[in-house]
Image (cartoon, grey):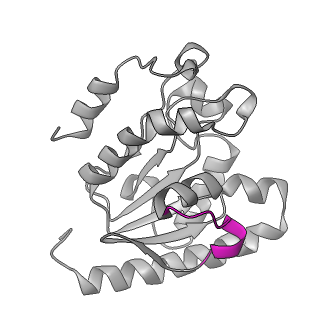
């Protein structure tokens, strides 16, 4: 496949796992197709399932605020999730669902080819970094996965449930701004 549109067409009206039977909309991903920064979350929530777009609820509003704090807009980045369908009751993704859906995420990463991948929360961090470490332990530290710079950050929803994480999120986004500038300087030909 050469484009995200072709990948979305290949996924189609996916029923490769049971989540296809319980979702309203498949939530593929959204944003700039040649973005320097790609955000990877866990799975669509209720609002995302209803709209068919990632991060459109309260966590999405906070993500927009966080992006603005470093001079970015969601149209500057690409946003996807580990799962493309909402788990019932917003439960955690199950291993079969992750195994079924992550080949599509790998293709999204390949096609977007970002400089920096920001993992939001445990599931995204553990998948991208192939680690068992929890997000609390490694958030805010610059990591590497292959040619990608990876920055694990709390999921914005965490700050909605625990206000003490809000300042931590803003600090991690300030670090993201620095990481992006370093990546841009080190490899300017990737995304002119």
Q: From the viewer's perspective, is residue 2 above or below residue 11?
A: below
Q: Quadrant of residue 136?
A: bottom right
Position of residue 84 in the picture relative to residue 123 (left or right): left
Q: From the viewer's perspective, is residue 138 above or below residue 40?
A: below
Report x, y in % for residue 23: 58, 19
Report x, y in % for residue 16: 44, 21
Residue occupying the point 67% across, 57% down: 156
Prevailing secondary structure class for the magenta stretch in the rendered image: loop
Residue occupying the point 51% across, 44% down: 82
Report x, y in % for residue 25: 51, 21
Tell me, yes or no, whether the highlighted magenta stretch contains residue 136: yes
**Which of 145/12 is in front?**
145
Q: Quadrant of residue 187?
A: bottom left
Q: What range of the chain is rendered magenta? A: 130-140
Q: From the viewer's perspective, is residue 51 above or below residue 133?
A: above
Position of residue 49 in the picture relative to residue 177 (left or right): right
């Amino acid at each position: 496949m050469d484009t995200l549109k072709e990948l979305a067409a290949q996924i189609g009206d996916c029923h490769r796992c049971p989540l296809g039977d319980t979702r309203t909309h498949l939530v593929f991903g959204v944003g700039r197709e040649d973005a320097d920064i790609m955000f990877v979350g866990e799975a669509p929530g209720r609002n995302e399932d209803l709209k068919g777009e990632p991060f459109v609820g309260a966590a999405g509003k906070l993500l927009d605020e966080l992006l603005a704090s470093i001079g970015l807009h969601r149209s500057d980045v690409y946003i996807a999730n580990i799962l493309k369908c909402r788990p019932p009751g917003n439960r955690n993704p199950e291993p079969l669902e992750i195994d079924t859906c992550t080949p599509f995420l790998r293709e999204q990463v390949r096609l977007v080819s970002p400089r920096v991948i920001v993992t939001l929360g445990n599931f995204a961090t553990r998948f991208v970094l192939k680690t068992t470490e929890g997000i609390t332990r490694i958030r805010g530290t610059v990591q590497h996965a292959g040619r990608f710079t990876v920055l694990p950050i709390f999921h914005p929803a965490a700050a909605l449930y625990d206000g003490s994480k809000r300042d931590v999120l803003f600090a991690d986004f300030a670090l993201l701004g620095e990481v992006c500038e370093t990546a841009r300087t080190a490899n300017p030909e990737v995304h002119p």
